[in-house]
Image: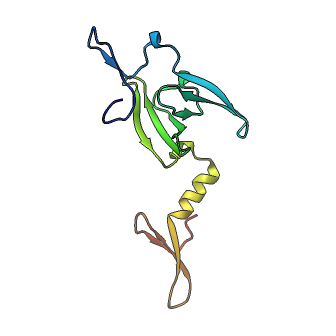
Amino acid sequence: MHPVLDRPYYSNVKTGEATYKRPESLGIEWKEYWDSEAHRSYWKSEVTNEIVYDNPYEIQENQWYEAKTETNETYYYLWNEQRQVAEEIQWEKPNELLTEEEKRVKEYRKWDEFWSTGDGAPYYLNKETGEITWKRPW
């Protein structure tokens, strides 16, 4: 395991070459299984026990993918094929993967509604930017 990235890497003791890509001589790393509740395939790493719902043999560069930890927590990673590592890992679902409804909900959660002490009219405060508006932002 890589001490910082906490993922397996492979080293050839004869040549000193190291890589994150599993050498073909070690056999298949990922096995495909069927999730009967989700009605879809998933793949499990025989090396790390990581579970992914996107075929790891068809992963494309600079695209977000969903995966599960051993404790079934969902996380997302952006794959960089040249470096053969996850370019970025995050727990929050990336905007690129959100449905339109999830985007509306995310935008709604950025705002708090308050009422003016003078006339009782509502105004809205963006918790991220501090912006205040009298017009409903969602």
**How are the colours assigned in the image?**
rainbow
Between residues 102 and 77, which one lies in front from this camera angle?
Answer: 77
Q: Above or below — where is 79 with respect to 72? A: above
In percent of the image, x 54 and y 59: which residue is there? 107
Between residues 110 and 86, which one lies in front from this camera angle?
Answer: 86
Q: How many marks?
A: 0
Q: Quadrant of the C terminus?
A: bottom right
Q: Quadrant of the N terminus?
A: top left
Q: Residue furthest bottom?
A: 118
Q: Is residue 23 left or right of residue 2?
A: right
In percent of the image, x 50 and y 45: which residue is there? 94
Measured as percent of width and height from the top left, residue 18 is found at: 31, 18
Measured as percent of width and height from the top left, residue 52 is found at: 56, 33
Measured as percent of width and height from the top left, residue 61 is found at: 46, 27
Measured as percent of width and height from the top left, residue 55 is found at: 58, 26
Between residues 93 and 3, which one lies in front from this camera angle?
Answer: 3
